[in-house]
Structure formats: C-alpha cells, structure tokens
C-alpha cells in the first residue's frame, strides 16, 4: 500500500509538537532548530506546516553534483545519502520551497526523509493536521476543525 | 607525386634505387646526436665543400650524405665510405682533404683514422669486420647509418614502405595480425608484452574510433636506441604504425616524443610531411582505400610519461599520472577509446617483419624471446654505443667481444640492465643469454635495453642510490608507497653512503622495498626497488661494509674513502697535482708527492690520472682512528 | 548477471559493476580507505585499501595485490583483506604517511589502529596536514570548476591554485574544504562574505532577511549546469517557507 504525507493546513493549531518530535527523533538532544518540519505561525493557534514535498522533479536532486539526494522507492521520500554529500549547500539554495535546511551546529544539510516510512511527527499531532495515509485518502478533503471545542479545561 | 597504386610505388622504388646507385662513391657522415656533439656537422660541411670544389671536374662523382647514428658513438664523428665499406673514426674537418684525395680518389687507406681493436692492437679497415658491427643483426636499426633520414626516397630505395605495400595489397588486417603473431615479437619498450596479442585485443574492442600510439619518451638514463631510430630512420617508425593501424582499424596515430629529443622531432616532422606528399600517409594510402595520419606530440620532461597510461593522459592534455590498470588501454585508452601503444623499436621492426615474413623474425632469438633487440652499451666499457643483436646472445659476447671489454681492462664487476627498473648482473652470470625471462630470473630485467657496464671502481650502494635519486625526482607523487617510499629510501641510502648507516638498515630497506613492490600504483614505484634488491642479492657484503666498517670497498663513497700515494710507486710525474681540483697534493716534479687528508675531498681525479697506479684508497675511518691513537 | 565472490571467506553477491570495496561493505568486512569518497570516481592513490585478490581461473594460492576501491568484482573471485603481506603493506603505507604528517590526528589515529605509535622513518621537517589524497581537486573537477590542482611531482607535490595565486575559476563552494579528511583547507564564511584560497566572494543574500548560504558565482555555475533557474537561488529558505505558507493560507478555510 503506497502511503503519503498529508498536510491539512486548516487543522493546524501551531502547537509545535511536530517540530519537537522531529527534533527528538533525529538525535538525542532535541534541539528545536534541528526540525525538518517547520510551522509558519501567523496568529494565535493558527499555523501552516511546511515540510518537504518530496517533489517528483526536485530542484535539489537536479542541482546536487554527487547524486547525494535520491528517491527512496519504498517510502517515496527523497533521501539524503550523507556518504556522498560534499556540503556545497546548493540544495539548500535551490529548493524553491525552503525545505532543505543547513544545520551549522552539526555542519550538515537536513531534510525530511519521512523517517524511513514511519514519520515520527505524525503521532504527536493532536489535530491530525499532519497524517501518514494511503494515497487514495490524500485527495479526500480534511474535516474542518472545531476550534471552539479545543478550549482547555481549567482555562479562562 | 602522390602514389595511387602499388605499381606506382614499385616504380618509385626502382627509380629511387637507380638514383642511389647512380652515384658510385658515397660519403656517409654520421649526424646522430652523439656525433653531432663531437663536431660531425663541420665534418659534413667540409666534405660538401671539398666535393663541390672537385665536381668542377665532371669525371669525379661523389655524394655526401648525412645519416643517422651508426651506433659506434665512442668513436665519432664516424664517416663510412661506399662502395669500399671503409669506416673512418674520430674524423675532424682537417682530415677531410686527405680522405677525399687519398682514399676516395687514390684508393689508399689512412690507418690512423681506422678503428684500432683494443684486444690485439690491429687496425680494422672495413665497417663489417669491426667486431662492434660484425656480431650485429640489424632489424629495427636496419637502415640507420645508410640513409639520409630527411630524404624519403633514400629510405624507399633501401626498402622502406615495401612491407606496407605488401600489407595493404596482399594481406587482410587479420593476416597482418597473424604474421606479427608468427614473428613472436614482444614489446621492445621494457614490458615485453606480445605485440600481436596487444593488437588483437584492440582489434576486438568495440567502437569505431581507435588509436595507435608510439612511445618515444625513452626516459631510462643511458638508453638512446629510440632516439637513434627516430632521428636516423623515422620512416621505419611511420611504416610500422601504418601497418599496425591497418591491422587494428585505426585511422589516427600519435608519436609522443620526449621534449629532450629535438632532432628526433625535426626528422620525424620532415618524414611525416614527405610521407604525406607521396601519399604514404593521409587519405587513401597508396591508393588502397585505407586512411591514416600521424601527429607528433612532445613531452614535457617527465620520465613518468613513458608509462603508458600516464602518456595517454599527457597526450589528452592532462597531468601525466598513471591510472589503475584494471581497465586495459586496448579497450579504454586515449580518450577512453581502444588504443595500441608500442615502443619506437617495436614499430621499427614491423615493416621488416611483414616484408620478410614473421617466420624469418622468429628464426632468430630464443624460444620465448624472438628476433633481435637493440641495446645501448655504456659505462665502463671500451666500445660504448648502440648495437642490435639476436636475443640469446650472451652478456659476455656483448661486453667483451663487441664492447671490447672494460675500460683500462679493470676487473669487471657487474652489468646493470633495464635502467632504473632493472638490476645488476654479476660476473658469475656473464654467460647468461640475454632474453626477457633469463634476465628477470637473475633479478634484473630487459627493460628498454640499456646496459651499463661496471668495474671494481663502482660502488653498488652508490649505484642503487643513484637510481633511487633519479626515480625520486621523477615519481609523479600520486601514490603513497612510491612518493613517500622513494624519499625515505633515499634518506636511508644517503645515510649509508655517508657513513651514518645503522644496524637494521638493510631490514628497513627490505621492508620498504616489499611495500613499494606490492603497494605502488604503477611500474615506476613497483620496480623502483629492483636495483636495490638485486645489489643486495649479489653484493650484500658491500652494504654490510658501509654499515659495520664505515668503509666503501670500491673506494667510491667520498665520506668513507681516503686517498694516499704509495711512495714506492710514485715517480713524481706531477699529473695528480695538476688534476687535483682543491690543491690537496703537494710535491715537486720528479720527487714523491703527498695527499693532504684535511684538504682532500676524495673525488678520485688523481687516481684516474696516475700512470703508475701509485694512488690507493682506504677507509677514511682509519684516519680518524689514527688521530685518536 | 550478479557475480558472487568470497571476501575473507564470506560469500557475497553484488551488482555487476560493483568494486571489491562495494562487495566488502555488503559483506560487512571493513577495509580502511583515505582517498575514497562515495560521490566521486575512485582514484587509487592512497593505497590503503589494498587487498589480495585471486581470480576463479587462477591457482588457489596465486594472489595479486590490488586496490579494493576501483577493482571490479568477478564471479568466483577470492579476496583476502588481512593476509600477512596486505597487513604489512598497509602498515608501511600508514608509517610513511605518519612520516609526512606526524601531527595530523587522522593519520595518528589510523596508524595507531594498525599498531604504529611513531613513524619508523624520517619525519617531515615542516609538516602540514595534507595527506595528498586528491579529494579536493577531484571534487572541484567533478563540479566542473577545476580551480585547484596538484602541482609539482614526487615528494614536493602539493595542492594549489594556478601559480599559487587566487584562482580565477573558483566559485567559493567550499566543497574542497568540506571534503578534506584532515580539514587542512582554511576558509571563512558569513552571511555577507566568504574567503578561500585567497579569493573573496560576495554571498548571495536574501533581500529581506540578509541570510545567505552560497556565493553569487556558485548560483550562476550551478544554474547553468543543472538547468535549475537562477531565480530559485535568490532567496533564503526562511523566506521561501514563508512564501509557501502564504500560498497555502489562501487555500485554507478557517472558521
């Protein structure tokens, strides 16, 4: 069954749990800067998740001189092959959507690789704004989010 | 002028033959690089002037021809006379008048210009009676010394391009291959790889475009056979390459000439232009429908560019560095296309092989090494020069019968064969028949045919050091074992010759040698330890003397050797005094002379000039011990 | 056709165009390398990866020493990565490298792993960290710039730009410095300026945020080479994500 990463923008409440989950999933210190999924915050509880589209005709793949970015046929992701990466940062500059990241602390490039077919961020999303679903489901429009019902107990 | 059929070629050949025969008396002045350096140009000019002066009288018909290297470089400038067959040696312009007047006109021989056999003191008149030439069988060098290399018709008259005509019009490419296979010819550049096998694997490689290359980068110090061939008979090389190209289906050829051979480049350029003019190169050669042309490429002064994969990289315009050999260049060579690379001497033999048949070539030589081989005989030998002999001739014949023995008849010690990749063969193996396998078994190798004769005044440790320092400069530096290993090996040897050798150095050297042999990328590094290992095999005691006794048994290593005059033998001739470059010798004529050790630099100049052998060497360490006492 | 071979007795089947090194990795056999890099053609210069190899048609005890990084595999091949002469050759190679670069941590570590604490040869009187693995020049060639090359023969070999001057072809991509296993190519970089090999580069800065990751020259070179439009390179990833997010917001229905 072919799976796909589905982003339902209207369900995002900008809680940032996916960012933390991603950071923790790739390394032990969980630096928030290490995340490969980024929430663009535009208001209270309003966010837009931006993550690698695993483009069919990717600019990052086209520009890489050593074929260090390759399609993983099982997960559908474009994987980083670190042993081939020469750290020229061209992919970072070339991605039209800003989903290729340069991590100065670890001095390397980062991108979403769909965690080898089991995206670690998905289980943490409280609203299902990000989901790992069969391809057929991807086209289905998302359920609108009842934002009123999200009021926390004990809050004002 | 363009030859468009075999008949036209035959017509040209007889025409050229007639023209050559028309002038009965010929004066052949050797103008190879060696004789040129001894002043042959002026000799040739003097002859030309003299003959011009005399041709006012129409009954006298002489022709002066400048030719390539006769090979007897020790005795140059050489002048051969035809049809008499007389060879005059060490000719100066002042002798020219007499030669023309007395010999050519008067038929009288001038004894002091004749070769004097050092063994019996006899003067030898005829070229072919001189031992140096008598034993030779010249195949690759068949025309050198007889033809003017800048005149294609001269070459055609003696048979150049006859083999080509036969190949193009009588044999298919496959048949040419078969003939070369029958000859058993092996590459004459050093590796000794079977020529036909190499051509066949190129022929069978897929693809339309392929190349034939000539390796004219002769880099071994002491080797000059390829130089002589390129300078003295360039057409033999061209002919061979055209035949080879026909056999493998190539239409493009390159001759890679080392930068230090300007005369070879000039003569090859002239030869190519002439061949093109006569339709022997270019489109539709001899009207056969086969197209092939040759370009010359000059090296940049790097020994490593004689290595085949490095040569190809250099030809491509890149830095001359070898690459891994797992992909054969017959499949992926120049520009990654099928390529045949052969040595100059290999190409030079092909025309004769096709003309006279592979079986003729195979009738000479040994079981596994067929045909003839050119050798450059140099070093401490009386007759230095270039010779070509059937494989299987013994070292003893070469050095003593042809070479006339060691200089000054000093005791023979060893002969170094194969250049910096080869080894030393000691006296007990002098009856070794020269062929690829036998030399390798003895710990040396054929290489390109250099033979350096050594006497008792040669230090084998110093010889190894010399070859190491040569290779250290020439290593391309790509791979660790060669680049670092040669440098470290040289450090070890510098220590040995300077008396700083320590116990265990021989083991260190052997360990490094093994790693270089196994780990290096190309043959330069792999064979670099050969001179070291072969001298260790036969002359280990010399190494041990350098380490343990701080002594050089041959009396050569300066730091380890002191000189002194043996009083009883000194006759006060004062020759040593004059020879000493640092004024370390004091003495009055007719009285005993003395060497002052504190000034003496142990150069040995006095030793070489002393007519009474009154100078002896001894380990310098004895001086220090004497001081201590 | 997928050839099967034996490495140190382990059976392994690999792709037809695999090298002995590929097969060793597939068989979990470690072969040390220095000049090898997955994204570049093998070079065979360091000679650290030497192995003993015997072809199927050869006698069982007849082996040849070859470099694993570039030697192709064959059906029925036998490979030994730790025969006595291989181990000894590797040790001598490291011993020699330690003599050239006695103060370089990578070389010291590799040498120590092979039992060498101090070089038994004469150490380099003026050591630096360059092990002459050629990776920098090879990656520069691979990118299509060829700004630096190895100059001089033999022991004096070094990596340098033409005539030891600031290389006019350099695009400031830092690939040479990044790939260098001993970090011996110095450079400095910020969002405004980059400096390497004596050349100064202006960075391609995002007009809004001022961020930059590549130089102008890099953008031009790679746009030409890859067909990716130059416009893609002109903004930072931060700005691009913001733009992307804004696009999605237009589609969004929020009550």
Image (cartoon, coloured by chain):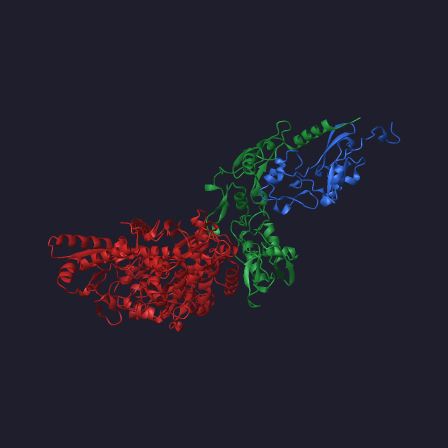
- For the N terminus of chain C, the quadrant is bottom right
Quadrant hosting residue C248: top right
Rendered position, B150 above or below A119:
below
Looking at the image, which residue is at 42% across and 62% down? B196
Residue B166, quarter of the rendered image: bottom left
Q: Is residue A49 left or right of residue B117?
A: right
Q: Is residue B39 at least partly visible in the picture?
A: no
**Residue B182 image position (x, y, % from top left):** 40, 66
**Chain B colour?**
red
Image quarter for residue B113? bottom left
Is B591 left, or right, of B417 in this rendering? Answer: left
Picture colour for chain A? blue
The letter of the green chain is C
Say if A48 sits above or below B266 in the image: above
Q: Nearer the viewer, residue B102 or B149?
A: B149
Residue nearest the observer in this picture, A63 or B179: B179
Position of B567 relative to B582 (above/below): below
From this viewpoint, is residue B141 visible? yes
Residue B312, image x, y percentages = 44, 51
Q: Residue at the spot x=25%, y=65% of the render?
A: B573
Depicted B126 relative to depicted C219: above or below: below
């Amino acid at each position: 069954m072919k799976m796909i990463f589905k982003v339902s923008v209207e369900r995002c409440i900008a809680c940032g749990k996916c960012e933390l989950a991603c950071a923790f999933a790739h390394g032990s210190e969980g630096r928030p800067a290490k995340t490969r999924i980024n929430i663009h915050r535009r208001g209270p509880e309003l966010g837009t998740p931006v993550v690698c589209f695993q483009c069919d005709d990717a600019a990052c793949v086209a520009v890489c001189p050593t074929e260090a970015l390759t399609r993983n046929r099982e997960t559908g992701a474009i994987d980083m092959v670190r042993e081939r990466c020469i750290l020229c940062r061209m992919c970072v500059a070339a991605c039209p959507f800003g989903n290729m990241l340069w991590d100065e602390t670890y001095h390397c490039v980062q991108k979403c690789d769909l965690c080898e077919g089991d995206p670690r961020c998905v289980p943490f999303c409280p609203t299902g704004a990000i989901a790992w679903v069969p391809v057929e489901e991807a086209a289905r429009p998302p359920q609108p989010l009842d934002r009123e019902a999200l009021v926390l107990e004990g809050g004002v | 002028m363009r030859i468009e059929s075999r008949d036209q070629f035959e017509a040209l050949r007889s025409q050229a033959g007639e023209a050559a025969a028309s002038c009965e008396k010929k004066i052949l002045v050797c103008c190879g690089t060696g004789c040129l350096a001894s002043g042959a140009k002026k000799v040739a000019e003097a002859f030309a002037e003299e003959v011009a002066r005399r041709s006012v009288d129409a009954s006298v018909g002489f022709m002066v021809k400048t030719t390539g290297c006769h090979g007897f470089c020790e005795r140059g400038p050489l002048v051969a006379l035809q049809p008499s067959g007389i060879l005059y040696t060490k000719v100066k312009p002042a002798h020219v008048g007499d030669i023309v007047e007395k010999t050519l006109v008067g038929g009288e021989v001038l004894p002091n210009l004749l070769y004097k056999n050092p063994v019996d003191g006899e003067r030898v008149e005829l070229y072919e009676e001189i031992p140096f030439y008598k034993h030779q069988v010249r195949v690759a060098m068949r025309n050198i010394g007889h033809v003017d290399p800048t005149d294609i018709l001269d070459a055609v008259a003696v048979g150049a391009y006859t083999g080509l005509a036969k190949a193009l019009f009588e044999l298919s490419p496959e048949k040419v291959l078969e003939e070369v296979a029958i000859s058993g010819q092996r590459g004459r550049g050093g590796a000794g790889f079977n020529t036909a096998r190499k051509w066949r694997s190129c022929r069978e490689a897929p693809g339309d475009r392929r190349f034939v290359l000539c390796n004219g980068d002769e880099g071994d110090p002491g080797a000059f056979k390829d130089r002589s061939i390129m300078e003295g008979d360039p057409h033999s090389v061209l002919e061979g390459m055209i035949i080879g190209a026909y056999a493998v289906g190539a239409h493009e050829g390159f001759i890679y000439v080392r930068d230090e051979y300007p005369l070879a480049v000039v003569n090859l350029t002239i030869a190519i232009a002439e061949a093109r003019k006569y339709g022997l190169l270019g489109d539709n050669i001899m009207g056969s429908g086969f197209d092939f042309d040759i370009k010359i490429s000059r090296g940049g002064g790097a020994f490593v560019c004689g290595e085949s994969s490095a040569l190809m990289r250099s030809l491509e315009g890149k830095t001359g560095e070898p690459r891994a050999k797992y992909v054969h260049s017959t499949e992926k060579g120049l520009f990654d296309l099928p390529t045949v690379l052969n040595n100059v001497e290999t190409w030079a033999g092909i025309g004769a092989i096709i003309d006279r048949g592979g079986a003729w070539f195979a009738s000479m030589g040994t079981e596994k090494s067929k045909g003839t081989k050119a050798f450059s005989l140099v070093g401490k030998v009386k007759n230095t020069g270039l010779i070509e002999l059937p494989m299987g001739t013994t070292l003893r014949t070469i050095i003593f019968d042809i070479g006339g023995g060691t200089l000054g008849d000093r005791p023979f010690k060893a002969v170094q064969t194969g250049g910096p990749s080869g080894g030393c063969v000691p006296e007990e193996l002098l009856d070794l028949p020269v062929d690829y396998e036998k030399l390798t078994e003895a710990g040396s190798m054929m290489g390109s045919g250099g033979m350096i004769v050594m006497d008792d005044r040669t230090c084998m440790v110093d010889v190894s050091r010399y070859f190491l320092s040569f290779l250290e400069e020439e290593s391309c530096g790509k791979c660790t074992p060669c680049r670092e290993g040669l440098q470290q090996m040289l450090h070890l040897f510098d220590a040995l010759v300077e008396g700083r050798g320590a116990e265990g150095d021989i083991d260190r050297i052997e360990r490094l040698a093994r790693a270089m042999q196994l780990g290096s990328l190309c043959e330069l590094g792999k064979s670099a330890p050969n001179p070291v290992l072969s001298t260790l095999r036969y002359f280990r005691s010399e190494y041990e003397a350098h380490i343990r006794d701080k002594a050089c048994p041959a009396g050569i290593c300066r730091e380890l050797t002191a000189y002194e005059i043996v009083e009883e033998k000194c006759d006060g001739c004062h020759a040593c005094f004059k020879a000493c470059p640092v004024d370390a010798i004091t003495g009055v004529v007719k009285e005993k002379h003395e060497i002052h050790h504190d000034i003496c630099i142990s150069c040995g100049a006095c030793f070489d000039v002393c007519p009474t052998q009154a100078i002896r060497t001894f380990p310098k360490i004895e001086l220090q011990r004497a001081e201590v006492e | 056709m997928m050839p099967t071979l034996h490495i140190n007795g382990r059976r392994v089947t690999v792709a037809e165009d695999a090298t002995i090194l590929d097969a060793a990795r597939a068989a979990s056999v470690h072969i040390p390398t220095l000049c090898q890099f997955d994204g570049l053609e093998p070079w065979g210069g360091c000679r650290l990866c030497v192995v003993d190899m015997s072809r199927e048609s050869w006698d069982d005890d007849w082996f040849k020493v070859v470099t694993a990084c570039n030697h192709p595999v064959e059906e029925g091949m036998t490979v030994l990565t730790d025969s006595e002469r291989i181990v000894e050759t590797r040790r001598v190679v490291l011993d020699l490298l330690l003599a050239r670069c006695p103060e370089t941590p990578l070389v010291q570590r590799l040498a120590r792993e092979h039992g060498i604490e101090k070089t038994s040869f004469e150490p380099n009187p003026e050591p630096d960290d360059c092990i002459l693995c050629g990776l920098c020049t090879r990656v520069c060639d691979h990118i299509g710039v060829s700004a630096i090359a190895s100059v001089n023969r033999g022991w004096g070999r070094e990596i340098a730009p033409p005539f030891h001057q600031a290389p006019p072809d350099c695009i400031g991509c830092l690939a040479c410095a990044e790939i260098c296993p001993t970090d011996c190519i110095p450079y400095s970089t910020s969002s405004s300026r980059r400096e390497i090999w004596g050349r100064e580069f202006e960075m391609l800065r995002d007009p809004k945020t001022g961020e930059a990751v590549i130089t102008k020259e890099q953008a031009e070179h790679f746009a030409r080479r890859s067909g990716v439009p130059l416009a893609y390179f002109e903004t930072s990833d931060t700005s691009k994500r913001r733009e992307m997010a804004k696009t999605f917001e237009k589609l969004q229905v929020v009550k």
